[in-house]
Image (tube, grey):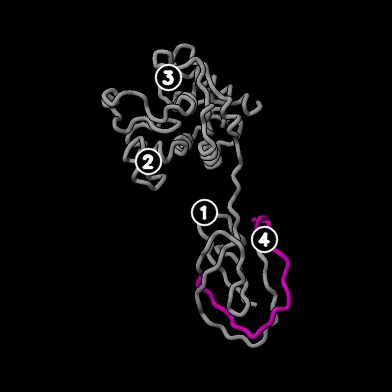
């Protein structure tokens, strides 16, 4: 029976709870275990004259119930130890993401602008009715990643995004180029479902994503990180903790938009509509 320990790649669950995943070998060839992560490992292989006498049942670990590797039992005799290197698969199943909001639920969320947006060509009712399946999938990835995973957290997040982006219709700050150039933060004006603004936010986000192209400007964020930028901003400002402590829509609006006495009521409408859509 042969053993080696292969280091498991960073950022995934592993079994056993040590720096390595255990694999057994027969005649110097690793039994292939179904998994997603290929890793390499230097190890000492004991080469033996042996024959297979049966399969051991699948193992399950209390630290990772998803581990379902099988091992090979062998009868051994003369053995010689050698040092070698190999690769194998770490039998680790990726953590499943939860669908926290459906397309149907999101599509029913909206708000009445009560004249605030009329001068902007707004309609009496704005909603997420045009949202795509891909966008809903990306939203759920972000909700899971940044643990926006309770009814209150989701309702506050969608409430803010609804007004920031006019329910997904405006993913960059509105205004002519001439107008935007008058802003102190130009060319790093609002982008994403929560509109990321200012060079220091772009830079911090670029570092967090490991993508310097984010500094190319708003359109790159829209094309590649529209939901991610919103989730990152939410997490960076510890808004989940604010929600959990009972902060109001007004309080959270001051973090997202800065001083605001105009739009928080619209955000509150969208917050309430999201709670209704989620069944609360």
**Label disc, if present, on residue 68 of the rendered structure:** 4
Q: CA distance from mark 1 to mark 3?
A: 39 Å
Q: CA distance from mark 1 to mark 2?
A: 21 Å
Magenta residues (range): 41-67
Quarter-of-image position of residue 164:
top left
Q: Residues within 10 Å of mark 1 (few under 14, many from 20)?
A: few
Q: Which residue is mark 2?
A: 204
Between disc 1 and disc 2, whose residue precedes?
Answer: 1
Quarter-of-image position of residue 176:
top left
Q: CA distance from mark 2 to mark 3?
A: 24 Å
Question: Closer to the camera, 205 or 244?
Answer: 205
User: Height in image: 61 above or below 165?
Assistant: below
Q: CA distance from mark 4 to mark 3?
A: 54 Å
Q: Position of residue 231 (x, y in %)?
A: 48, 37
User: Height in image: 115 above or below 241?
Assistant: above
Q: Position of residue 68 (x, y in %)?
A: 67, 60
User: Height in image: 13 above or below 258?
Assistant: below
Q: Does dot 1 land on a helix, a strand or a loop?
A: loop
Q: Point out the frontmost of discs 4 and 3.
A: 4
Quarter-of-image position of residue 35:
bottom right
**Label disc, if present, on residue 260 of the rendered structure:** 3
Q: Point out the frontmost of discs 4 and 2.
A: 4
Q: Position of residue 75 (x, y in %)?
A: 70, 81
Are dots 2 and 3 in contact, CB under 8 Å? no
Q: Which residue is mark 1?
A: 11
Between disc 2 and disc 3, whose residue precedes?
Answer: 2
Between disc 1 and disc 3, whose residue precedes?
Answer: 1
Query: Would residue 229 be found to the left or right of residue 87 on screen?
Result: left
Q: Does dot 2 land on a helix, a strand or a loop?
A: helix
Between disc 1 and disc 4, whose residue precedes?
Answer: 1
């Amino acid at each position: 029976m042969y053993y080696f320990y292969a280091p498991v790649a960073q950022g995934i669950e592993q079994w056993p709870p040590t720096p390595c995943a255990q694999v057994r070998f027969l005649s110097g060839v690793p039994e292939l275990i179904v998994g997603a992560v290929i890793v390499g490992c230097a190890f000492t292989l004991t080469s033996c004259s042996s024959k297979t006498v049966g399969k051991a049942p699948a193992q399950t670990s209390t630290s990772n119930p998803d581990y379902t590797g099988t091992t090979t039992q062998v009868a051994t005799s003369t053995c010689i130890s050698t040092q070698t290197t190999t690769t194998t698969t770490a039998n680790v199943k990726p953590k499943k993401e939860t669908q926290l909001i459906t397309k149907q639920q999101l599509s029913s969320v909206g708000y009445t602008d009560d004249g605030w947006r009329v001068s902007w060509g707004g309609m009496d009712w704005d909603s997420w009715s045009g949202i795509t399946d891909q966008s809903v999938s990306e939203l759920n990835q972000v909700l899971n990643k940044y643990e926006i995973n309770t009814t209150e957290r989701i309702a506050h997040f969608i409430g803010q995004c609804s007004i920031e982006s006019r329910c997904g219709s405006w993913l960059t700050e509105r205004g002519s180029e001439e107008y935007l150039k008058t802003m102190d933060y130009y060319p790093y004006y609002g982008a994403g479902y929560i509109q990321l603004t200012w060079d220091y936010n772009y830079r911090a986000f670029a570092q967090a994503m490991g993508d310097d192209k984010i500094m190319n400007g708003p359109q790159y964020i829209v094309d590649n990180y529209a939901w991610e930028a919103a989730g990152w901003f939410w997490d960076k400002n510890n808004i989940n903790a604010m929600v959990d402590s009972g902060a109001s829509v007004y309080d959270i609006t001051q973090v997202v938009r800065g001083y605001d006495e105009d739009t928080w009521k619209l955000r509150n409408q969208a917050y309430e509509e999201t709670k209704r859509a989620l069944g609360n």
